[in-house]
Amino acid sequence: MKNSNRNSNNSKKNSNSKPATKSSKKFKLKRNIGLVEATLYGVGIILGAGIYALIGAAAGVAGNALWISFIIGAVVAAFTGFSYAELSSMYPKEAAEYVYTKNAFKKNYLSFIVEWIMFFTTIISATTVALGFAGYFSNLFGGNIVTIAALLIGILSFLNYYGIKESAKYNNLSTIIEFSGLVLVIIAGLYYIPKYAFDGVGYIDFFAAKDGLHGIMTATALIFFAFIGFENVANLSEETKNAKKVIPKALLLSLVISAILYVLVSVAAIGILGSDELAASKGPLADVINKVFPGAGYVLSIIALFATSNTVLVMLIIGSRLLYGLSCNNSLPAVCKVIGSRGTPYISVGIVGLLAIVGLFLGSIKKVALLTDVGIFIVYLVVNLSLIVLRYKVSDSKRAYKAPLNIGRFSVTAFLGIITCMIMLYFFELELILYEIAALGVGFIIYLVFNSSKRVVNKG
């Protein structure tokens, strides 16, 4: 009650001053997120559409050695995860990659482009996964796919606007459901594999790769879409309690939990169906369950609806926070950082929702997953480089967390992150690289136009 008395006294002292109007009142982002919720946000977005939709396509590329692709993907993600964890403890801000790059290189255009890539990949991912949800929904209940996807984006955008705490509650529920679906697949594997996969007709060679190392690495490039999300936990820093300590822990915990589940699920799926049958399936995990527990595949289809809708929700949340962060850093119009009475950046929420709906006519989920991965690996490369640079530029900066394996100030894990990202980019088709260059071009034009207008206003 001391604050109330102080405010009352101040009001009396300033009775002659201009009263605050409702329109002039400023709202700030609410710090409602703790370690459990931040970790569930990371796990929720990682355990989304990727594992449910892409495991079949990846099996067609890697063969029975698919599980190795998931291990490689986890290692690649871990190197960059260490960098994000340290950087987020130094700069607990929205638009994380923008802040890291700006502090490391002092180049506004480079910072903007990096964050633009993140924004672009977030939007196309939300759009594509919404179409994935619509496909599952249409198969179960009928209806037009585009209409269903648009309605989903609209409903989840409202939930995004309504509040981060409310969004977190839905995310927590969906994450638990997604988790239970993957656990069901693992249980099926534990029941089936010891009986049939190591003997007789059902024997599975878990090291049989269709195209050797190249096939395994190409599959890694595809399934890496299923790992994307842990880095986005850093964008919740301004809404997280004790962010410097909580965010690094949440980043690494969400990655470790997801990696273990993915490896176990891939072993179970291959052990039950084999790579050829898995690759030919339209609902791979549902077919895995059906083979062991006939009729239970319907349950997996329902779970897939939660998985895809949850991924869309978190992508919409992150996308709106990216716009908010860019606006706070004066790289986009100030209107994008307006906070409403619900404590959320409602204009950014609306823009992201509309863009996601407009993008509903993008290509297949496989193609967009690969396109997303190209952008993500470019961003990861720059983030790892930023950590190396900042170790020397601001070595005295307080860090609640420091990445392991160091030679003096030099971060070995960040260096390995750069190398692995470059290796992964080698396995993408030229067409996808060109698409990403085009997206970069659009972002650069936006940057030039907005900054030109700012210079004109300043001169005026």
Image: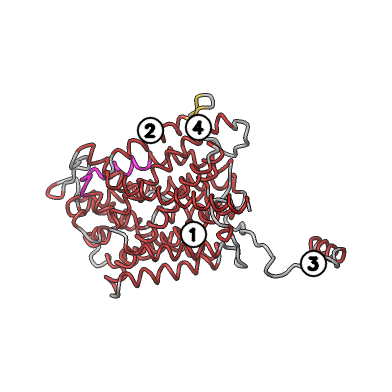
Q: Magenta segment, principal secondary structure?
A: helix
Q: Residue furthest left?
A: 201
Residue drawn at 49 percent across, 59 percent down: 317
Q: Nearer the viewer, mark 3 or mark 4?
A: 3
Q: Residue furthest front?
A: 460
Dot 1 amino acid type: Ile
The image quadrant where one finds the N terminus is bottom right
Residue 179 vs 423, above or below: the answer is below
**Contact, CB < 8 Å: mark 1 with mark 3?**
no
Q: Secondary structure at mark 1?
A: helix
Residue drawn at 46 percent across, 62 percent down: 352
Q: Position of residue 321 (x, y in %)?
A: 52, 56
Q: Position of residue 294 (x, y in %)?
A: 23, 65
Dot 2 amino acid type: Ile
According to the picture, the residue beneath numbered tag 2 turns out to be: 419
Sequence-wise, which precedes: disc 3 or disc 4?
3
According to the picture, the residue beneath numbered tag 3 turns out to be: 18
Q: Magenta stretch?
A: 60-74
According to the picture, the residue beneath numbered tag 1 turns out to be: 317
Question: Quick one: 289 or 258, which is closer to the camera?
Answer: 258
Q: CA distance from mark 3 to mark 4?
A: 50 Å
According to the picture, the residue beneath numbered tag 4 turns out to be: 388
